[in-house]
Amino acid sequence: QQQRQQQIRRRQQQQQIHRRQQQIRRQQQQQIRRQQQQQIRRQQQQRQQQIRRRQQQQQIHRRQQQIRRQQQQQIRRQQQQQIRR
């Protein structure tokens, strides 16, 4: 009788230990998933930022070109005026 009880107890303990291990594994996996998701978010954010910067730079470039054209036009007008005089 005592032996049987002891055996039963041991089994129960082992089962408990097994459950705990499983829990711990699940938690670890969850953590890993969260970290991976975070990494993916960060990468996406970085990409978006890069894209924004490129767009801004392009805009600046276009504005500069516009300004140059305008200046050239002005210079031509002035030259023409001088020629008329």
Image (cartoon, rainbow, N blue to C red):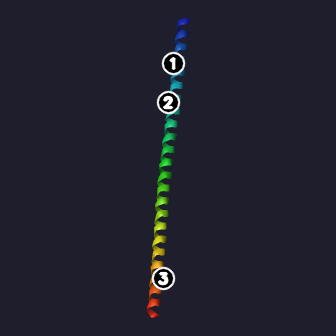
Q: Residue at x 47, y 58 (%)?
A: 51
Q: Dividing the image into 4 quarters, which one contains the N terminus?
A: top right
The residue carrying mark 1 is: 14
Task: Report the disc number at residue 35.
Answer: none
- Tell me the crowding category of disc 3: few under 14, some 14 to 19, or many 20 or more residues within 10 angstroms, Cα based: few
Choose mark 2 or mark 3, whichever is in front.
3
Q: Position of residue 39 (x, y in %)?
A: 48, 44
**Marks 1,2: beta carbons within 8 A:** no
Which residue occupies the extreme top position in the image?
2
* Helix, strand or loop for disc 1: helix
* Helix, strand or loop for disc 3: helix
Q: Position of residue 18 (x, y in %)?
A: 50, 23
- Dot 1 or dot 3: first in sequence order is 1
Q: Position of residue 31 (x, y in %)?
A: 52, 36
Q: Position of residue 77 (x, y in %)?
A: 47, 86
The residue carrying mark 3 is: 74
Choose mark 1 or mark 2, whichever is in front.
2
Residues under labels 2 and 3: Cα distance? 73 Å
**Marks 2,3: beta carbons within 8 A:** no
- Dot 1 or dot 2: first in sequence order is 1
- Tell me the crowding category of disc 2: few under 14, some 14 to 19, or many 20 or more residues within 10 angstroms, Cα based: few
Residues under labels 1 and 2: Cα distance? 16 Å
- At label 3, the amino acid type is Gln
Choose mark 1 or mark 3, whichever is in front.
3
The residue carrying mark 2 is: 25
* Helix, strand or loop for disc 2: helix
